[in-house]
Image (cartoon, helix red, strand yellow):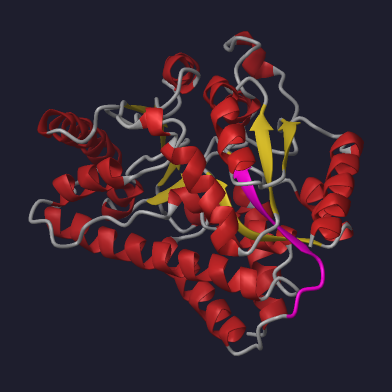
Amino acid sequence: MSINALLDEFKVKAATPKQQLAEYKAQGKKVIGVLPYYAPEELVYAAGMVPMGIWGSNNKTISRAKVYCATFYCTIAHLALEMLLDGTMDDLDGIITPTICDTLRPMSQNFRVSMGDKMAVIFLAHPQNRFEDFGLQFCIDQYNNVKEELEKVCGHEITADAIRDAIKVYNKSRAARRAFVKLANDHCDVITPTRRSAVLKAFYFMEKPAYTEMLEELNKELEALPVCDWKGTKVVTSGIICDNPKLLAAFEENNVAIAADDVAHESRSFNTDVPEDEECPMMALAKQFANIDHDVLLYDPQSEKNRRGEFVADLVKKSGAQGLVLFMQQFCDPEEMEYPYLKKALDDAKIPHIKLGIDQQMRDFGQAQTAIQAFADVLEMSK
């Protein structure tokens, strides 16, 4: 397929998760919803089921979820529950509910109460002190619990060999996505911000071998192109999620390309591979979680050094970007508390940035568009 045909296919996949869920069910497959984030999807794949990411929605309004949720929960959590309550995700056979933040922790019980009679609701608690032997063992115990619950849904044992095969499948996908984001920086005339987002978002809804095969084909097509002589400006994006096409269109209207990202929904989810040389596949999965670094939601024993802020500043420099755009999810306490430290690191490195408050119920992007336009002008003058 041509580059445009591949990009169009990714765009369709990213925009139609409900249709793809229906197709999986029509094929007799079982599907497990996976909420944010760091759930061991490899276990779902190893069970012969299809994992489907649930990261809220840009096209719904919170209504039913208000009965269960506090108003100060972020819209990602609200709208994930909304889709389950309004029937959008009725075909799911179960959901995995990680508890990585202070919103997702109580939300796991809201999902259990509201959806427990419709589907399997699988609780997952990660260890914050994840480096020590006891942290690794806690993580393995939690993953084993997830495995046992998934076995009840699929009706058979999830073997160690199946998990090892799944790890290889997912590592291959991670490598393809890492290659893609680098190629997107080299070819930002072709891979616009909205196209880049669609390619990465499609991963959550497609079967992984098919996704990786299509992405590797796209990567080969991009590698054959000459590196683009970009005349506009480049930024790094940061935050939990920034997948709204209308908002990203403001970048394109102002000739702003995305050089790299520090986004949980995007690069943070595939930066760290699972070790393939570990004898026990469950230990391998636990070590992968322990090896994840520079995430605002994960405990850093060296946090006083502001390692994460410096990591993000260094990412901007290495990517060739002129600045950073922070998409601040409304009511996200970890991101709000981190911001002063992130700002300090960016200021110390003399990297300009803007902070945009967003949520998934935004329909009017006028203020954000104006901010992006003004920021693009500032970056252009500083080139």
Q: Which residues are magenta?
A: 229-238
In the image shown, does 315 or 335 lie closer to the viewer? Answer: 315
Q: Is residue 355 above or below residue 191?
A: above
Q: Which residue is at a point 66% across and 44% down the rendered structure image?
A: 242
Between 2 and 134, the one lying in front of the other is 134
Picture residue at 75% right of the left edge, 38% below the top = 59
231 drawn magenta: yes
Q: Nearer the viewer, residue 252 or 110?
A: 252
Q: Residue at x 40, y 35 (%)?
A: 94
- Res 92 seen here: no
Magenta stretch contains residue 162: no
The residue most toward the left is 279
Could you tell me residue 222's position as x and y percent?
61, 82
Residue plotted at (63% across, 18% down): 65
Quadrant occupied by the N terminus? bottom right
Residue 282, x across and y down, in percent: 17, 46
